Amino acid sequence: MCSRLTVGAEGGIANADHLIGSLVLTVIAVAAAEPTRVLRFLLMPLGAGLCVVPLVYGISGLHLAVDLASGLALIALSVRRGRVTERYGNWNRFVV
């Protein structure tokens, strides 16, 4: 979300980074609760989008590297499962 400040993004790519960053933060906030943590898998298409958008806009250099690294990290980190510490009755089978 801070690509305008950190790598000097301008125009459409800056808007795309800001939009994807906002969506990522929203999904993370919702998926932070144990019953809804299955929503963390929505981070994978957002990470893929973060990897593809710089190629569509044709940027190069540092900004491309940062977006690719961020997208791949987002995909990789959304796979890990943690331990379920609470019980949710009949909903336990849906807590992934």
Image (cartoon, rainbow, N blue to C red):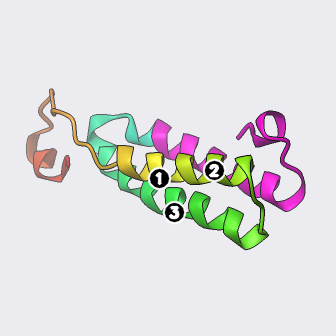
- Packing grade of label 3 (10 A; few <14, some 14-19, many >=20) is some
Image vertical order of residue 74 relative to residue 57, above or below: above
Q: Is residue 80 left or right of residue 76?
A: left
Query: Badges 2 and 1: C-beta atoms under 8 Å apart?
Result: no
Residue behind mark 2 = 65
Q: Crowding at label 1, few (<14), some or many (≥20) Cα neighbours within 10 Å?
A: some
Real-space CA distance between mark 2 and mark 3, rounded to the nearest whole angstrom:
14 Å
Q: Is residue 13 left or right of residue 48?
A: right
Image: magenta residue range: 1-29
Depth check, mark 1 against mark 3: the one in front is 1
Q: Residue furthest toward the right?
A: 11
Q: Position of residue 7 (x, y in %)?
A: 79, 40
Instruction: Say what amino acid the circle numbered 3 marks.
Output: Ala
37 to the left or right of 93: right
- For marks 2 and 3 on the same chain, the one whose residue lies earlier in the sequence: 3
Residue 42 covered by magenta stretch: no
The residue at the point 70 percent across, 41 percent down is: 1
Residue type beneath disc 1: Leu
- Image point (15%, 27%), residue name: 85
* Closer to us: 72 or 37: 72
Q: Residues within 10 Å of mark 2 (few under 14, many from 20)?
A: some
Residue at image mark 1: 72
The image shows residue 38 at horizontal and vertical percentages of 30, 51
The residue where tag 3 is placed is 48
